[in-house]
Amino acid sequence: MRRVASILTALAAFVALVACSPETPRKPGALAATRGASSEYLVFYAEGKHDQALRAVESAGGTTVGEDPRLGYVLADGRGDRFVENLGADRAIVGVSPDRGIGFATGRGIGKAAFPDASSFTESRGGEPLAGRQWDMRMIGADRAHAKTPGSKQVLVGIIDTGVDGKHPDIAPNFDRELSRNFVTDKPRDENGETLDGPCEAKNCKDPVDADDDGHGTHVASTIGSPLNGIGIAGVAPGVRLVNIRAGQDSGFFFLKPSLDALTYAADIGVDVANMSYYVDPWLFNCANNRSDTRKQQLEQQGIITGMQRAIDYARKKGVTLVSALGNGSTDLGRPTVDDKSPGYPEGDQKVRKVDNSCINVPAESNGVLSVSALGPSGRKAIYSDYGTEQTDLSAPGGDVLDGKGAKATRSILAAAPERVLRAAGRIDASGKPKNADVVRDCEGGSCSYYQYLDGTSMAAPHATGVAALIVSRFGKPGSGGLTLAPATVEDLLYKSATQKACPTPRQYVYKAYGESQTHDCEGEPSRNGFYGRGIVDAWKAATFEP
């Protein structure tokens, strides 16, 4: 179920690699009982083959229950593996994916045993009360950029994630509740009857648009656009509007269809930049025709690759710049060899299979997406961050508790956290006091707000998203509902304003922690390499340079 394998065996005892739902043993035979049950599938058809696809569904014994011509798929109800295989035999069909939970966010939770006490934290240096803890903003010059270009309210930033706590005091001023949407219905249990999201908190299991029962999306939104309001922290672009476009379950898993719905909705309402700090699939790597996969599994992966690419293309054509987390697998994505984590949902279905560079992580390796690697406070590539010359477009601070002697929370990224989530997890006591150093409370102005330290490429991507929002604020032209700037132009200006950084010397960088070591090989030139891409995003340059 976990997306990211352990980086170092000894390290696993000190740092949790990925925030995800609790794992429970699979009940023998539980999945087998569902194999023949009727299920809904997203059936993707070739261009111009809509009518033939409808006939194929009927011929395979299924029923069409919906469709989206924008992305070229029909939603079909069918029974068992044979239904999928029969569909796949029709030349009009290019992919068939079940409408179920298939992925999760790439943020890394912080194990409390890894940290010193709070007395080691950096004190405020002026600005927002917790600004002194934001080494990440100083690294990219965002603290200086605020005075020049804080971002415009005519710029919409979409957070496609687990939700956003729109009532958080350090998010609410910039939160657009009217435009926010939730495309997810909570699932208390998975197909095996095991706990997935747990009991529903809202009527019909549909959370309100200003809720986040996970905390991941709130952290991302805060990094992008927490306002300058004398509370807590400030984001990279503190003047933009934030729109929650929820596609992830409370447990952190994502459905393919909500991801497609989120992207098309972002496009249709005029979102300028969308952040996607997650991956979509039960497969760590999506392979179109891996020989070790069943025909049904091949069709599922083909559907994920095709469907997400169509949604990405649709969004870009409507002016949405798309930013993604690269991944936390500590892997050279240009040279994958073995995938033993897939399919990661439901738990217990994993198998070992050989993979190669034709297999891709979605959306990080989809065309038209800017993928971001993570850096620690020293500027080195974070120990957990994926890399690759073809895959890394940009780099940004994502945190690395091990970037230095020992492990310290101050090396992670601090951003807003929902109080309700912290209370439910036992992270704060009855009086509201944080129990551990990875949670911070700010009570400036008479009311308290909460923040947490997290590591991950999930935390790196929103820094790039924020800089992209500053670029649209500066160079965008008036359009329907606000400012607009072509994604290709935003991408070009992000590259031009980034600070190039060469590979380390020697290029074979050795990470050491707790008596273990691992080597990552950085390839490429300062203008583009596997660790830093085309450079580290730079908010100050984006706010001041003239292209």
Image: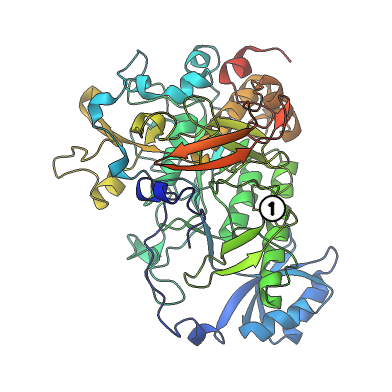
Residue located 40% across and 30% down the image: 411
**Where residue 300 sits: x, y (%)?**
66, 69
Q: 206 and 329: which one is in front?
A: 329
Q: Is residue 337 above or below residue 480?
A: below
Image point 86% across, 65% down: which residue?
A: 48
Find residue 31 and report its horizontal and vertical position in percent: 49, 81
Q: Position of residue 175 (x, y in %)?
A: 44, 36
Kind of element beneath mark 1: helix
Residue at the extreme left? 431
Which coloring applies here?
Answer: rainbow
Query: What residue is shown with label 1?
Result: 311
Is residue 188 positioned above or below 477 on the image?
below
Nearest to the observer: residue 120 or residue 73: 120
Would residue 477 be visible to someone looking at this image? no
Name which residue lies at 46% across and 26% down: 377
Whether residue 267 sits left or right of residue 382 in the image: it is right
Q: Is residue 437 above or below residue 50?
A: above
Q: Is residue 149 visible?
A: yes
The residue closer to the viewer here, 218 or 365, is 365
Camera-nearest residue between 200 and 291: 291
Is residue 527 shown left or right of residue 322?
Answer: right
The kind of residue tagged 1 is Ala
Q: Is residue 9 left or right of residue 120?
A: right
